[in-house]
Image: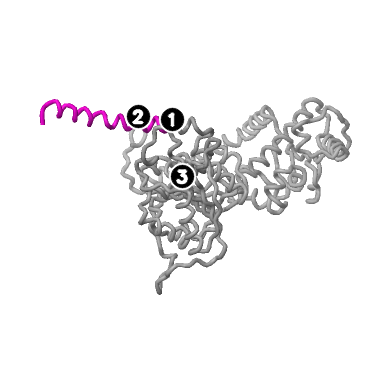
Amino acid sequence: MNVSTVVSLLISAILCPFALLFLKVTFVTTMASMFNPSLHKQRHQFVVDFIQRNKPKKVVDLGCGECSLLSRLKFRREIELLVGVDIDERKLRRKTLGLAPLSTDFLQPTFEQLRVELYHGSVLEKDARVRGFDLVTSIEVIEHLHLADVKCFSAVVFGYMAPKAVIISTPNSEFNPLLPGLSGFRHSDHKFEWTRAEFTSWALEACCHYGYEVEFTGVGRAPQGQQVGFCSQIAVFHRVRRENICNVPPGYDPEDEFSYTQLYSVNYPSLRDNNTLRRVLVSEVLYWTETLKNKWMEERSGDPGAEFSSWLAARGKQLHENQTTWQEYLEHPSDQCSTRALWDGEGYDHLPSAEHQQPFTLHSSLWVPLGFLCSCIPKVSSLSGSVEHLKLLLMDAPEVRLSVDGSAVIVNCLQQNDQNEKEVNDIEDTGSADACQFNSTAERVEDWEDEVYDEGSPCVKTSSGRV
C-alpha cells in the first residue's frame, strides 16, 4: 500500500462522518419541505385527536424518546395517568423538566387530576404498572426492533398489557422512492421497514390471536397520482373481547412483573386534593371579604354617618331585581342606587341569628356570613359545595378569622391610622401599671439574687456587680 492510498483512506475516514451528517440533514430538510405540518407533528396530532374523541384516562407511550408527545398530552386533562417508557435512560432524565407542572397549574388548579411517570425499560419487557391502560401508543418504534422480536412485542402489548386501544405507526417503505436523497432505510437504526401489505398482515395476525380489531390509516399524503399510500402508516387497534389469549404458566401472577425503573413521577395540582382545595378556597374567601370591606370603607370615608348594612341592603335589592350576582356587582359596580335604609350591627347586645345572610358591621369589624359567601359568590359555592363544608375547610386556615360558632368570617375594618392610635392609647393606659409592676419585679429580683448568694453561688461580688 503506497502513501497516496493511505492518505486517501485517512481523508475518507475523516470526511465520512461529515458526509453522513450532511446526507442526514439534507434528508430531514427534504422531509420537512414535503410535509406541512412536519410528519412527526402530524403523527402526534393524530394521537391528540384520538384522545379528544375517546377520552382515555390512562395512557402509556412506548418508546417515548424525547417525550415530545408526552409534552403535548399533558395538556389533555381527560388523562389522569400519563406514562412514558424508553430504553434510553439519559435521554429520559434530560426531558423530565418539560413534563413538570407549569406555574399556572399551581395558580389556577382544576378538579381534573394528572399524574406523569417516566420509566426506563424495554418495550419487550413486562411490567405490571402499565397493564390495563385505556390507550397504548407506539409511534415509529416497532421498526427499531429486530424482526425476531416483533412477536414478543405483540405478546407484551396485546397479550400482557391488554389495553382498550393501541395506536402503532411505522414507516411505509413504498413511499421511500418519493423521498429525494434516500437510499436504504429512513434511519440508520431501522432494522426493517414494512410495505402496506406486510404491516397489514402483522396487524391482522395480532388481532386474531389477542382479540382485537384494527383499522388502517396514516399521515403524510403522497403527491397526486402516486398510489403508494401514506408516508407513515398507522394501525388503530380496539379490544373486542376482554380476555386475552396467552399461555400462562401455572402459578404465574402477571401482577408480580416489575421490570422497569421509575425515573420520574409528579402529581399535578388538583382541587380534588384537600390541601390544594383549601388553599384556593381561602384565597377566594379572603379576596371577596377584603373587597366587601373596601366597599364599606369607601362608603364610610365618603359619608361618615352612613351605615354600611343599609347600603348593602339597598344594593342587594337592586341586584335581586336585576338578577345580578354579588360577584358581578363587585367586579362591575353601578353608580346608581345610593339609598340606605336598614340596620347596622353596632351597639347590639347580641349577634344576629345564624340564618342572617347579609354582611353586617359589629364593633368596627365586618361580619360576612358563610351562607352569604356560598349563595352569592359562584366560585366559593362551586369550590365548597355547602356552608358546612366551607366551614370545615376554613376552620383549619389560620389566615381566616371565624366567629365563635363558625358561621361568619370576621374582617377588621379599622383603618391603619385608627389602629395605630388605638395601640398608642393602649400603651399609654398601661404605662403606669407597667412601671409599678417593674418596681415590684425589681425588688423580687434582688431578693432572689440574695437567696442565690446565700446558697453558696460561686459568683464573686465586685464593686461593679457580680461576675
> Where residue 181 sits in the image (x, y, percent)?
39, 32
Question: Could you give the CA–CA distance between mark 2 and mark 1, rounded to whole angstroms?
Answer: 10 Å
Residue to which mark 1 is pinned: 29
In what element is the residue under mark 1?
helix
Q: Residue at x 53, y 53 (%)?
A: 135
* Residue 60 horizontal/vertical position (percent): 49, 51
- Tell me residue 81's x, y (percent): 53, 52
Q: Quadrant of the C terminus?
A: top left
From the viewer's side, name the closer residue of 57 and 241: 241
Disc 1 and disc 3: Cα gap in Å?
19 Å
For label 2, the residue is 22
Question: Which amino acid is tagged 3?
Answer: Asn
Question: Counting residues from the N terminus, which is met first, the one under dot 2 or under dot 3?
Answer: 2
**Which numbered disc, 1 or 3, marks the residue closer to the eye?**
3
Q: What numbered label is drawn on residue 184?
A: none
Residue named by callout 3: 172
Helix, strand or loop under label 2: helix
Q: Is residue 21 magenta?
A: yes
The residue range painted magenta reads 1-27
Residue 114 versus residue 331: which sits nearer the camera? 114
Magenta span main SS: helix
